[in-house]
Image (spheres, helix red, strand yellow):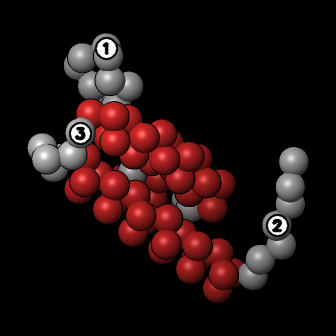
Amino acid sequence: MLGLLINEMEQKEIEYLLKRELEEIMMDLEDPRIEYNVKQAMKERYQTLFRLLRRLASEEECIKYMPKVAKNKKDLFF
């Protein structure tokens, strides 16, 4: 386990960067031109970034980026 000591301004900046990256991934996942294998890798990255966001952001902020459960069991979310 690693620890990180950051001030409030740095926390807000990291939150901002994580949110922008999550939004970009969500947009890319909707692009039909992207292959299935690439989308699977993007979903794994999304999960990792979302776990990081949960450590920094408030519950209300995290709910906005929470992965949606897909109707198809093959896909975990989106």
In primary-sequence order, the first of circles 1 and 3 is: 3
Q: Is residue 25 above or below residue 7?
A: above
In primary-sequence order, the first of circles 2 and 1 is: 2
Badge 2 marks a residue whose secondary structure is loop
Question: Which residue is farthest bottom?
Answer: 9
Using the rendered image of the protein, determine whether residue 43 is visible from the camera's viewpoint. no
In the rendered view, does 14 fall on the left or right side of 8? left
Q: Residue at x 32, y 23 (%)?
A: 75
Tell me the residue that label 2 is attached to: 4
In the rendered view, does 45 fall on the left or right side of 23? right
| Marks 3/2: CA–CA distance | 36 Å
Disc 3 vs disc 2: Cβ atoms closer than 8 Å?
no
Q: Nearer the viewer, mark 1 or mark 3?
A: 3
Tell me the residue that label 3 is attached to: 35
**Residue 11 pos. (x, y %):** 65, 75
Label 2 packing within 10 angstroms: few (<14), some (14-19), many (20+)? few
Q: Residue at x 56, y 61 (%)?
A: 57
**Residue 41 pos. (x, y %):** 42, 40
Q: Is residue 74 above or below residue 26?
A: above
The residue under label 2 is which amino acid type?
Leu
**Residue 16 pos. (x, y %):** 48, 74
Badge 1 marks a residue whose secondary structure is loop
Tell me the residue that label 1 is attached to: 73
In primary-sequence order, the first of circles 3 and 2 is: 2
Q: Residue at x 83, y 72 (%)?
A: 5
| Marks 1/3: CA–CA distance | 19 Å
Task: Give the label on residue 36, or none.
Answer: none
In the rendered view, does 76 fall on the left or right side of 2? left
Name the image quarter holding the C terminus.
Answer: top left
